[in-house]
Image (spheres, rainbow, N blue to C red):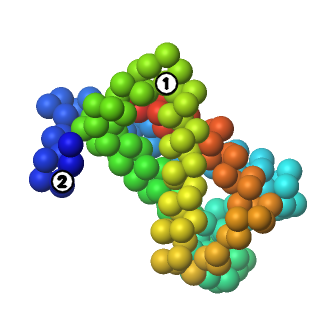
Amino acid sequence: MTMSAASIALPSRRRGGVITVATTGCVLAIVDGFSAYALGVLFFGHPSFARVFQGVAAALLGKQAYAPGTDGMLIGIAMHITVAFGWATLYYVTYRNWPALQRAVNGKRGVATTGPALGAIIWLSMCYIVFPMTKLHHVPLTSLGFVVNFIHHMLVVGPLVVALDR
């Protein structure tokens, strides 16, 4: 079965979908934001919480995101939240319109298998589709940054989206 944009059916209970996406987007933004900070401290020696979100803002602003003040951090937080809501929405619409995904998620090991797969898809999409359209540099497959973030997305981001967005 092929799916076109015209054949995507939005849920009949729009409010339920909005609440699901809003909850998933909020929780994902918070958990991913704090875990990104923790990973930054553990693996990359980032000295501050602000630096994590300045790094996100660097996608739009380049090195100006790291200028003194809170502008870069606030723009980065807004971008981070937008991306979290974007992934929550995309997954929600896909899940509601793809019976095979529904069966996989609701199967015996649903979240345990589809969550890491979704996390891998999210990180690879960010690296090879989103980042190249921004001022961020390419993240080599063999770099520590790629590996740490890939594992983080497989163990935290993907399973969180799948678990919350059902």
Q: Residues within 10 Å of mark 2 (few under 14, many from 20)?
A: few
Residue named by callout 1: 110
Measuring from the top left, give residue 85's x and y in whole percent. 42, 49
Q: Residue furthest top?
A: 108
Quadrant housing residue 144: bottom right
Viewer-closest of 38 and 71: 38
Occupied quadrant, residue 44:
bottom right
Q: Position of residue 17 (x, y in %)?
A: 28, 34
- Residue 75 in view: no
Tell me the residue that label 2 is attached to: 4
Total count of labels: 2
Where disc 2 sits, the SS reads loop
Quadrant position of residue 62:
bottom right
Residue appearing at x 67%, y 83% in the figure = 63
Residues 129 and 47: in front is 129
Q: SS for tag 1?
A: helix
Which kind of residue does numbered mark 2 sit on?
A: Ser
Asked if residue 6 lies left or right of residue 15, the reply is: left
Q: Quadrant of the N terminus?
A: top left
Q: Is the C terminus in the top left, top right, bottom left or bottom right quadrant?
A: top left
- Indicate whether 145 appears above or below 19: below
Residue 149 to residue 133: above or below: above
- Percent coordinates x, y for residue 14 in the rendering: 19, 35
- Circles 1 and 2, Cβ within 8 Å, touching? The answer is no
**Whole-percent x, y for residue 133 in the image:** 48, 77
* Of the image marks 1 and 2, the number of the one nearer the N terminus: 2
Residue 134's disc number: none
